[in-house]
Amino acid sequence: MIPGITGVRGWCRRMSRLGFSIFVLLATGWLPAASLAANSPAERLSSDEHPEQWAMSIAQETSVPPGLPTGGADPRTLSEPMALPAPLTEPAPLFRPSIVDIDNAFPATAAPAWEWQLLPKGVLYHTYWASAAEPRMSVNAVDINGNSGPYINSSIGGRVPIVRFGSRDMTEGWQFDILGGAKLRQNAGDDWDVVTVDFRYDLLLTHAIGPHRWKFGFYHVSAHLGDEYMLKHPTEPRLNFLRDTLVMGYSYYALPELRLYGEVGYAFNYDISRPLEFQFGFDYGPAGKTGPYGAPFIAMNGHLREELDYGGNFALQAGWAWRSDGMNTGTFRTGLYYYDGKSPQFSFYNRYERQVGWGIWYDY
């Protein structure tokens, strides 16, 4: 046999065996197909491709199946495939509940971040609707014990939110408010004489979270007889009734439309009055925008005072109410008014009065 031919045949047999071995390794997954590529990934990528794209291609094509023995720093020796980074996507927009009154709902979703706000929108702790004590805007035409009259009881007052650390879009956080006003009684049957007037101002720190509301603060109130009344009743004694009081109140919104509340006050400076007083009651009425047709309301308040041996008064209001959809608006109400107990005008603090009439109120 010719030696040259024999050498060629041997070389062919060796190449056949090598090809068969490579086929078996490929078929069983032991040999990465990327190692047999004609060109490396770097050669197949054009020079203008991004380096991150080049690195991801290297990682993808040089990963090996699980179980291959590991060793060295070559990516092809890793025992697990290299995980590719997740594709970059735009972050999902944060859900922010629509602007609602407190008063409207308590969303289950996470609330927006709290921040400092000067002259914020809205009130975190509203005045008690049926209370005769707090500053508000109101006019009541009432009969008192069937005496001469009728009498006009009115309040001229306002409330200013000063600063809040809390949500801008929801009524929650901490807030400082200033209230002030005068509570006036006139005798419409006697030349509209001013009978008596009480002056009051409040400095309140309030807090709201979910259906819970708190207030902590101070108020001053003092009572004064009207000039015309004193001229016509020269024997009427003038009582220097005053209170400088620390107050704490709590309200719970069992429903957005229903508030239950209680309050305790302690006077550290007083005359005629005594230190302790308590208020409690409920307000039921619209919590959100009512439109022009309004919605019904009912409110009850009890006020107990130490100087009356913890007696006091009971007040009930019922009628129709309107609200806007803004967070900085109050509640406008009109309806029947009933009051039974010691006078809410502190110049007559120990006189019994039964008042029946009609009222108009705007509460903050």
Image (cartoon, rainbow, N blue to C red):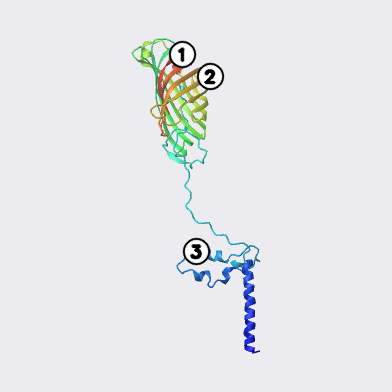
Q: Tell me where residue 332 appears, x and y as whole percent.
A: 40, 26
User: Dot 3: few (<14), some (14–19), or many (≥20) neighbours within 10 Å?
Assistant: few
- The N terminus: image quadrant: bottom right
- The C terminus: image quadrant: top left
- Judged by depth in the image, the label closer to the viewer, 1 or 2, is 1
User: Dot 1: few (<14), some (14–19), or many (≥20) neighbours within 10 Å?
Assistant: some
Proximity of marks 3 and 2: CB atoms separated by less than 8 Å: no
Say above or below: 251 vs 107: above
Q: Can residue 245 be seen here?
A: yes
Total labels drawn: 3
Q: CA distance from mark 3 to mark 2?
A: 81 Å
**Residue drawn at the location 39% of the way across and 30% of the way down:** 291
Say above or below: 286 vs 77: above
Query: Of residues 21 and 319, which is closer to you in this image?
Result: 21
The kind of residue tagged 3 is Gln
**Residue drawn at the location 64% of the way across and 89% of the way down:** 3
N-terminal of the two: label 1 or label 2?
2
At mark 3, the secondary structure is: helix
> Label 2: which residue?
306
At mark 2, the secondary structure is: helix
Say above or below: 120 vs 286: below
The kind of residue tagged 2 is Glu
Q: Tell me where residue 304 appears, x and y as whole percent.
A: 52, 20
Q: CA distance from mark 1 to mark 2?
A: 20 Å
> Label 1: which residue?
354
Q: Tell me where residue 185 appears, x and y as whole percent.
A: 39, 17
N-terminal of the two: label 3 or label 1?
3
Proximity of marks 1 and 2: CB atoms separated by less than 8 Å: no
The kind of residue tagged 1 is Arg
> Label 3: which residue?
53
